[in-house]
Image (cartoon, rainbow, N blue to C red):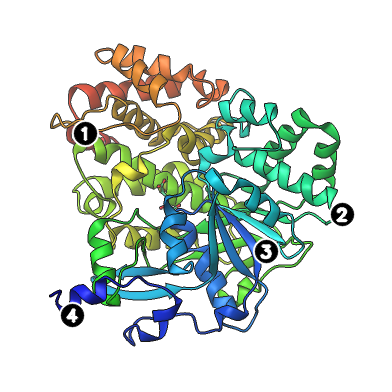
Amino acid sequence: MPDANTALLAKRLSRTILDRLPPAIERPAYDRAAVTPGIVHIGLGAFCRAHLATYTDDVLATGETGWGIVGVDPLSPAIRDALKPQDGLYTLLVREDGRDSLRVVGSFLDAMATADQLDEALALMSTPEIRIVTLTVTEKGYCQDAATGSLDEMHPLIRADLAAPEAPRSVPGLLAEAIRRRRAAGLAPFTVLVCDNLAQNGIKVRGIVIRYAELRDPELAAYIAEHVSFPCTMVDRITPATQDADRATVDAALGCRDAWPVVSEPFKQWVIEDRFPLGRPAWEKAGAILVDDVHPFELMKLRCLNGAHSLLAYLSVVAGIETIADAMADPHLPAVMRRLWAEDLIPTLPPVPGTDIPAYTAALEARFRNPGIRHRTIQISSDGSQKLPPRLLEPARELFAAGRIPAVIPLAVAAWMRFLLEVDEAGNAYKVADPLAGALTGIARAHRDDPAALADALFAIGDVFAPELAAEAAFRTAVVAWLESLMTAGVRPTLEAFLAAP
Ligand code: CS2
């Protein structure tokens, strides 16, 4: 006989058991049956489910009914397969200092995967009800050349889509085809709302989609350029990948099984340019900030939060430090991070309306220390070739252009280069996850005993390093010196030497 607990856990989270969940679990405070889809969201990872979906859930709770979300996974059906039997429901576990709070989020009405539902997804995107397409597909999802932010025209998915544009597999191809279908049906285009960590994300993705459309059909490109709105956004909520222990915590609290809960910190922020020709949910009612110009907010977040994350991640993976909270307990890393902010990043930022930047970075440090969030440094280390340019290389370029020499960015870049060796200082192997992993790790292997040759070979990758930056002698010298120190002395002595220098 299964005991009572096993019997409960055999049940799956779904709408039929929503009102039987324990009282402490927050749940949709509105009639989901009355909500219709207004948004298609592409990319079903953890982040959008902790961020956009909770803002939208809060708006639905104010009585708006036309802005439910249908999620579309452009990669694998795994999350669709987890959410579909749960009627789109999942749990957000918010953690801080061992205090957990749980919330079942109701704003996803349905989930699809383009792997086997491409036509269904395109048909939905071509209906009048869908007025916004939101995206969280990570930096690499846009098939961009990271150093310039323009379309990577040789990207295999782009080549494939240009050969068969009505059955797209890339994100630019999907957006262009959906916009074409709407236009053919006499419908105004949806707004494209990019929620990924790219600098000037809306402007960049607009350029990428227009360039793709130009290669497909210049007339479509002109139409997109004239009629489609791509507001920029700044998105923020630390949302580590869900671990098995989190699933167990959620299942025990719910008394039923949630196949794919999400874990996040309490903090969240969303700054959005208010350009939605077909309307939008009143996200401001849920705390979003609607502005004319997102740029200052986005630079502050992308550089201070994400730039610090990347610095900490590469040094930590090499030193064997597993999480960002552990890195914050290290005797040296927090001091190095503060110097990155003060010396290299804050000087590149314009004033940010209503924000005191030193207070912002102090709050960031407290968020990084949150012991409830086990944000793994190996997770943040992924896709460095895409992440380094907006987070750290663009500010370095701006500092040089202003006649200044970055003090800490070369150390972060050297740490990334050392990380590409795929073995930490204790001899433990790990894998580099990156769209350029093959090329990057091949270079690292070829030059594992020669820091200068390793740095030079990596500087020559134009998708990552803009030629002006690679040509800065002072940048090269500093990166090579730190890389040599990391490869010969190791992380700890390198950080000690760094902090000892004036
Ligand atoms: C992180 C981000 O994985 C990473 O690269 O820097 O996911 C970060 O946690 C979010 O942008 C926070 O909003």
Front position in the image: 415 or 131: 131
Cα–Cα span, label 2 and label 3: 30 Å
Q: Is mark 1 within 8 Å of ligand 1?
A: no
Cα–Cα span, label 1 and label 3: 42 Å
Q: Please, what is the three-letter code of the amino acid marked with disc 1?
A: Val
- 358 over 181 or under it: above or below: below
Mark 2 or mark 1, which has the lower sequence index? 2
SS class, disc 2: loop
Estimate how packed mark 4 is, as few (under 14), some (14 to 19) or many (20 or more) residues with alpha carbons within 10 Å: few
Q: Is mark 3 within 8 Å of ligand 1?
A: no
Which residue is depicted at the point 58% across and 44% down?
199
- 331 over 85 or under it: above or below: above
Q: Is 466 left or right of 455, judged from the image as shown?
A: right
- 225 over 449 or under it: above or below: below
Which residue is depicted at the point 20% across and 31% down?
424
Mark 3 lies on residue: 291
Front position in the image: 115 or 305: 115
SS class, disc 1: helix
Mark 2 lies on residue: 186
Expressed as whole percent of the image width and height from the top left, the position of residue 403 reads 55, 31
SS class, disc 3: strand
Is residue 395 something that shows in the picture?
yes
Between marks 2 and 3 in the image, the one whose residue lies nearer the viewer: 2
Expressed as whole percent of the image width and height from the top left, the position of residue 355 reads 54, 64
Cα–Cα span, label 2 and label 1: 60 Å
Q: Please, what is the three-letter code of the amino acid marked with disc 3?
A: Val
Mark 1 or mark 3, which has the lower sequence index? 3
Task: Verify CB contact (< 8 Å) between mark 2 and mark 4.
Answer: no
Between marks 2 and 1 in the image, the one whose residue lies nearer the viewer: 2
Mark 3 or mark 4, which has the lower sequence index? 4
Q: Within the image, what quadrant is residue 289 found in? A: bottom right
